[in-house]
Image: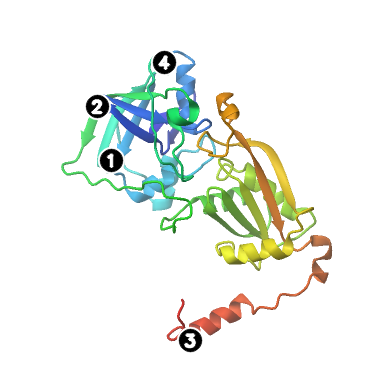
Amino acid sequence: MINAEPESGFINMGTYRMQLHDRNTLGLWMSPGQHGRMICTKYWERGKSCPIVATFGQDPLTFMAANSKLPWGQSELGYVGGLRGRPLEVIKGPVTGLPIPAHAEVAIEGEAPPPGEEARDEGPFGEWPGYYSGGTIGTGEPQPVIKVKAVYHRNDPILQDEAPLWPGAYRMDLSLRAGLLWDQMESAGVQDVTGVYNHTNYLWVVAIKQRYAGHAKQAGHAAIAASASARNGRYVVVVDDDIDPTNLKEVLWAMMTRVDPATDIEFVEGCWSTPLDPRMPPEKKEARNHTNSRAIFYAVRPFVWRDKFPKVSRTTRELRDRVVNQYKDILPFP
């Protein structure tokens, strides 16, 4: 979905679920705090409908960029152009004036009226946490709609499907969020970040080469504050640079051997969440208090006595890689 902030003209592109209500009406679910909803709200507060473009069957890189969590004011349209190395080709929508990705298979132009004028029940829909959530079922109230004004399509359009999977399912996608968080942490001044990975939206792992006392805490707090990871999270694990953040077994080993539960787990209250959170109490949803708590695990050697910490008994990653490469034709794993 594409819409434009009415004051600055900043154009946002995001991924939001849509439900077909009838020939000219689509249901729209946008979690509170999402940029697309914030832009719509600015129109609604003025009693106006928000112009919207929605595309279906866009190229995979454009879809991935739309699903990335860029800071407010940075357009995903420009971001995908940077990833591709050339500008994204767009056409100007005849109805809305908004940019329409030129190679999308299907596009609609329309507007989202203020929910006080028109809203409908939305859902249920199986979402990424692994539960039916959001929409009317999660908030107890009807959700915004898009009144369709124009439809454009190719003959025999190809529509890819990315249905939300159970969070434990094997990941096949190329997530950009880990790279975004790495970049945002370095931009915030966190030194010597050596790796970042999100195993699910609930679990982020950041590896650092500790340089000073408080370095791990700085990294942990930056991870829950950065736009790439601020929403929907639950756990952040900070590990040393000898741990591969993409390898959950290594991460769990660091948590089991370098975390003292009494001193190395920090809880942060009042963080940005969503009605999609299945653990959010009903009374919080009813009060529209869409926040949750986060746990930061400092699974690092304590900085002040790191030199006295026991040495690991396994081989270095470099040696292991050399052995695996030498015997890769007979080993049963890559």
Judged left or right of residue 280, residue 136 is left
> Given this view, does label 3 or label 1 mark the residue nearer the observer?
3
Give the mark nearer the N terminus: 3 vs 4: 4
Q: Residue at x 67, y 64 (%)?
A: 254
Give the mark nearer the N terminus: 4 vs 2: 4
**Which residue sits furthest front?**
282
**Which label is found at residue 150?**
2
What is the spatial separation of the Cα atoms under label 3 and label 2, in whole angstroms? 60 Å
x then y, percent, for residue 137? 45, 30
Q: Is mark 2 on a helix, strand or loop?
A: strand
Query: Is the Cβ of the residue at disc 3 closer than 8 Å to that at disc 4?
Result: no
Q: What element carries label 4?
A: loop
Give the mark nearer the N terminus: 1 vs 2: 1
Query: Is the Cβ of the residue at disc 1 closer than 8 Å to that at disc 2?
Result: no
Circle 1 residue: 102
Instruction: Name the amino acid, label 1.
Output: Ala
Q: What element carries label 3?
A: loop
Circle 3 residue: 327
Instruction: Name the amino acid, label 3.
Output: Tyr
In the rendered view, would you say 178 is above or below 284? Answer: below
x then y, percent, for residue 261? 75, 55
In this view of the protein, can residue 269 be seen by the observer? Answer: yes
What is the spatial separation of the Cα atoms under label 1 and label 2, in whole angstroms? 15 Å
Instruction: Name the amino acid, label 4.
Output: Lys
